[in-house]
Image: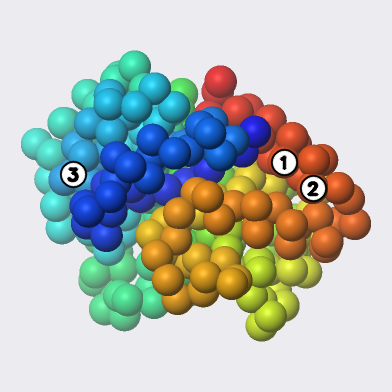
Amino acid sequence: MIFDSHAHYDDKQFDQDRDQLLSSMKSNQITKIVNIGASIDTTRKTLSLADAYDFIYAAVGVHPSEVDCLNEESFGWLKVQTGHPKAVAVGEIGLDYYWEKDPARQEQQKYWFLRQLSLARETKLPVIIHSRDAAEDTMELLKQEHGIHGVIHCFSYSKELAQEYVKMGYYIGVGGVVTFKNAKKLKETVKAIPLERIVIETDCPYLAPEPYRGKRNQSLYLPYVIEAIAQIKDCTLQEVEAVTFRNAEELYGF
C-alpha cells in the first residue's frame, strides 16, 4: 500500500479526468491521499474532495504566495475548517522568497506563517511546511514555535538542515525530484536521514518523476520515487513502501 502525503487534485489540470483517475487509485495500491490547501479557494475544494472520496483527506491552509487572501474574516473561516472530520493538517504554510523579493511582502508571509503555526498548535494538528529560498527564516520561526510537529514538504536544502529538522521531530517530504539525475542534494539527504523520518509525496500535478519529468504528475507514479529511495538506502521496495506508509499515518494521526 502507498500513501501519497501531499497532492493537489483540486488543480485545474485534473478537470478533464479527475474522477476517472482518482477512481483508479485503490486498484493500484494508492490507499490514502492527503490533498493540500494552498489558498482559501483551494482549501474549500480540498474539503469537497475529502467529502467525495473515502481515501482522500484534507490539509487546510494558505501557501505563502497566496497570503493576500487572508484577513481576520478568512482566517476565522480557516480556523473553523480545522474541525472538519477529515482535516488532518494545517498546510501548506511557510515562506517562499524565490517568488517574493520585497522585504515588506516577506514580512507579510512571516506574519501569516506564525498565525497558522499558532492555529496548528491550538488545534493539535501537524503542519505541512513550504520553504523555498528561505531556509534561515523558516528554521528560526519553527524553533520559536514549540510543541508543533509536521513535515518539511518537497525538501530542497542541505542534508545537515534535514538532520536538524529530524532532531526537532519533523518528517522530510520526498517526491519525484529524487529520481532526477541532477538531484544531488536531495539524494544526499535521503541517504543521511533515517527512513523512519521520510514520507513520500507527489505534489501533483507538479514535479513528476523520471521518466515522466515535465508531464502532469499523479499518485500512480509514486513507485518510481519508492524505487529511487530504495536504491539510495540499499533496501527493498517493500521496506520503503511499508515504512513510508506507516510514517505518513503517524504524521497525520491515523
Structural distance between the alpha carbons of marks 1 and 2: 6 Å
150 w.r.t. 187: above or below? above
Q: Residues within 10 Å of mark 3 (few under 14, many from 20)?
A: many
Q: Quadrant of residue 242?
A: top right
In this rendering, position of residue 40 left or right of residue 170: left
The answer to whether one can see residue 245 in this image is: yes
197 w.r.t. 163: above or below? above
Q: Look at the numbered disc 2 and give the secondary structure of its residue.
A: helix
Q: Residue at x 61, y 48 (%)?
A: 200
The answer to whether one can see residue 119 in this image is: no
In this rendering, position of residue 223 left or right of residue 48: right
The amino acid on which the numbered mark 3 sits, given as a three-letter code, is Ile
Give whichever of discs 1 and 3 has the lower sequence position. Answer: 3
Residue 211 is marked as: none
Structural distance between the alpha carbons of marks 3 and 2: 37 Å
97 w.r.t. 166: above or below? below
Residue 237 is marked as: 2
Residue 206 point in image, percent of width and height: 41, 64
Q: Residues within 10 Å of mark 2 (few under 14, many from 20)?
A: some
The amino acid on which the numbered mark 2 sits, given as a three-letter code, is Leu
Residue 139 point in image, percent of width and height: 56, 57
- Cβ atoms under marks 1 and 2 closer than 8 Å: yes
In this rendering, position of residue 172 left or right of residue 113: right
- Cβ atoms under marks 3 and 2 closer than 8 Å: no
Give whichever of discs 3 and 2 has the lower sequence position. Answer: 3
The amino acid on which the numbered mark 1 sits, given as a three-letter code, is Glu
Residue 40 is marked as: 3
Residue 152 point in image, percent of width and height: 55, 52
Q: Which residue is tagged 1? A: 241
Q: Residue at x 44, y 39 (%)?
A: 24
